[in-house]
Image (cartoon, rainbow, N blue to C red):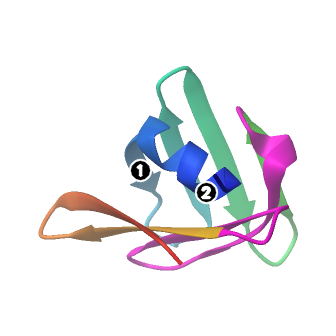
Amino acid sequence: MTQAEAFLPRVRRLALNRQATEAQVFLEEGFLYLRQDGFACFAQGVEAEGVEGFSLGRTGVVIRFKDGSALRLTYRLGRLRPRLC
């Protein structure tokens, strides 16, 4: 099982700011805070040590894990749609 497959069932909600520079991925036991702009790019919170990188967009976020797996979290018609990449 990859890290993305293990992370996927724990995701509950995604919150993005209007500028698409910050995201909070709410999990069962806390949240993962992601920030990416011209001055900073970091992840902190639950499971932050397993995140290799991420990219934020207007509709969602792609999280890349250290084992090479990736997870895409997007919204469609007001519902969270997580998918493995």
* Most distant residue in the top direction: 29
How far across and how far down the image is residue 26, in percent?
Answer: 48, 37
- The residue pinned by badge 1 equals 14
Q: What residue lies at 38% left-to-right and 76% top-to-bottom?
A: 59
Q: Which of 1 and 56 is in front in this view?
A: 1
Mark number, residue 84: none
* Crowd class of label 2 (few under 14; some 14 to 19; many from 20; radius 10 Å): many
- The residue pinned by badge 2 equals 4
* Crowd class of label 1 (few under 14; some 14 to 19; many from 20; radius 10 Å): many
How far across and how far down the image is residue 43, in percent?
Answer: 78, 51
State yes or no: residue 57 in magenta: yes
The answer to the question of whether label 2 and label 1 lie on touching residues, with beta carbons closer than 8 A, is no
Q: Could you tell which of marks 2 and 1 lies nearer the N-terminus?
A: 2
Indicate whether 48 appears above or below 22. Answer: above
Indicate whether 6 appears above or below 68. Answer: above
Q: Nearer the viewer, residue 17 or 25?
A: 25
Residue type indicated by callout 1: Leu
Mark 2–mark 1 Cα distance, whole angstroms, equals 16 Å
Q: Tell me where residue 68 sits by quadrant.
A: bottom right
* Most distant residue in the left direction: 77
Indicate whether 56 appears above or below 35. Answer: below
Q: What stretch is highlighted in magenta?
A: 46-69
Q: What residue lies at 47% left-to-right and 24% top-to-bottom?
A: 28
Q: Determine the secondary structure under disc 2.
A: helix
